[in-house]
Amino acid sequence: MGNLKDKIVFESFSDFSDNTRTLFDYLVDKQKNDKYEMIWLVENPEKFKNIKIKNVSFSYVEPKNEYEYEHMKKNIEDAKFLIGSNRNIKKFDERQVYLNLWHGTLLKKLNDYKIDNNDWDFLLCPSEFFTDIYERELHISKEKLIYFNNPRNDDLWIKNNCLEKLYPNQKFKKFILWMPTYRQHRTGSNIDSKKEFSLGIPIFSNIEELEKLDKFLQKEQILLMLKVHPAQDLSKIKINSMKSIKIVKNDELEEKNIKLYNLIAESDALITDYSSVYFDYMILDKPIGFTIDDLKEYKGYVFKEPLEYMPGTHIKDYENLEKFLFEILENKDKYKEERQKLNKIFNKYSDNQNSKRIVEFLKL
């Protein structure tokens, strides 16, 4: 068994994104790549060949043949640190330190989700409130939990003119971001909601309702941006962008060099459902609307009464949605006190120092 080298291996889904990406960016900003060789495991390394950062390279996350496997193994087997958030990295040496950042606070039950956590040394947990939930859902001992918030939350404090990049020279009175979780996984392996949505998104039953909303949004100069979940089966989404309702996917953000949480920070309000993004969004202390029209058909929750932990307007139908939009337009925020109270329970830290804490913890 040889010596481990000053190497850090990274992984995320989608590739080169989310919690792992923000932590990586912090390390590069602090010039830690002068000391450490950094390897990203991605689906297609060729896609990232134009990224020229000192001591940074890309390898295969899911090798399809012996050459790709050997390439991946060579990069991983002598690395001191493995840092991931979605797909598992296998250790080649028991001395390696594996930190799993995970990809969001748990609200949805994991049920039959297969988790191979034998190699994890540490798992990020947003606060002590979730200790028992993480132990139960992720089958991990509390000794492995470290109580820091998501590195991606650091991006909520970075201004990047995202709207201007996406829609140059357009002005809006309000920008509302809609981020539904996926109902059917792109691989077809997970179908998390038994309810069928005719347009592939909650609340709307027909295109006429969408057109009606688009006219209202145009009149009031509101932008409603629907950010499609990266795991969603896109064949189920039956709508296209309109004048004031815009559909945005990961590829478009990547093309314009927009990090998702920089975009989130620019919004005036969030619409979501059972997605973990709302736990992060609470840090911004802005209004949240929750679509709950398939609450009973969804796969299950870590809380017995999930609505008690969703501080915002509960949207069951089109009329509820329209009412929520009017409240945002009139700067009404009825759930501010409840949101602030729960945020203190859910998020141990509500600042932009999460990457720093992790780097200090790992002594990088």
Image (tube, rainbow, N blue to C red):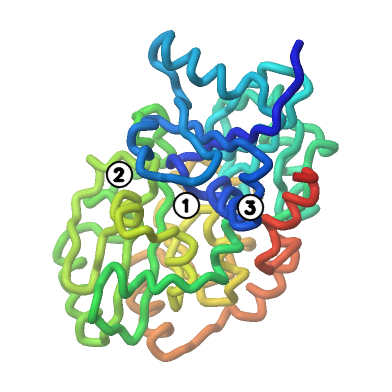
The one nearer the camera, 304 or 122, is 122
Q: Earlier in the sequence, mark 3 or mark 2?
A: 3
Query: Residue 226 appears in which quarter of the rendering?
Result: bottom left
Residue 265 x, y percent position in the rendering: 49, 71
Q: Is residue 126 left or right of residue 211?
A: right
The crowding category of the residue bearing disc 3, from other C-alpha atoms within 10 Å (few below 14, some 14 to 19, many at least 20), is few
Q: Is residue 77 left or right of residue 11?
A: right
The N terminus lies in which quarter of the figure?
top right
The one nearer the camera, 50 or 167, is 50
The one nearer the camera, 46 or 20, is 46
Q: Earlier in the sequence, mark 1 or mark 2?
A: 2
Residue 19 visible at all: yes
Q: Is residue 326 above or below residue 236?
A: below
The one nearer the camera, 257 or 311, is 257
The crowding category of the residue bearing disc 2, from other C-alpha atoms within 10 Å (few below 14, some 14 to 19, many at least 20), is some
Q: Quote the CA–CA distance across marks 3 and 2.
A: 49 Å
Seen at 17% across and 78% down, the residue is 215
The residue labelled by disc 2 is: 196
Q: Secondary structure at mark 2?
A: loop
Residue 107 visible at all: no
The residue labelled by disc 1 is: 295
Seen at 27% across and 84% down, the residue is 171
Q: Secondary structure at mark 1?
A: loop
Q: Earlier in the sequence, mark 1 or mark 3?
A: 3
Residue 121 x, y percent position in the rendering: 76, 32
- Cβ–Cβ under 8 Å for marks 1 and 2: no
Q: Secondary structure at mark 3?
A: loop
The C terminus lies in which quarter of the figure?
top right
Q: Which amino acid, mark 1?
A: Leu
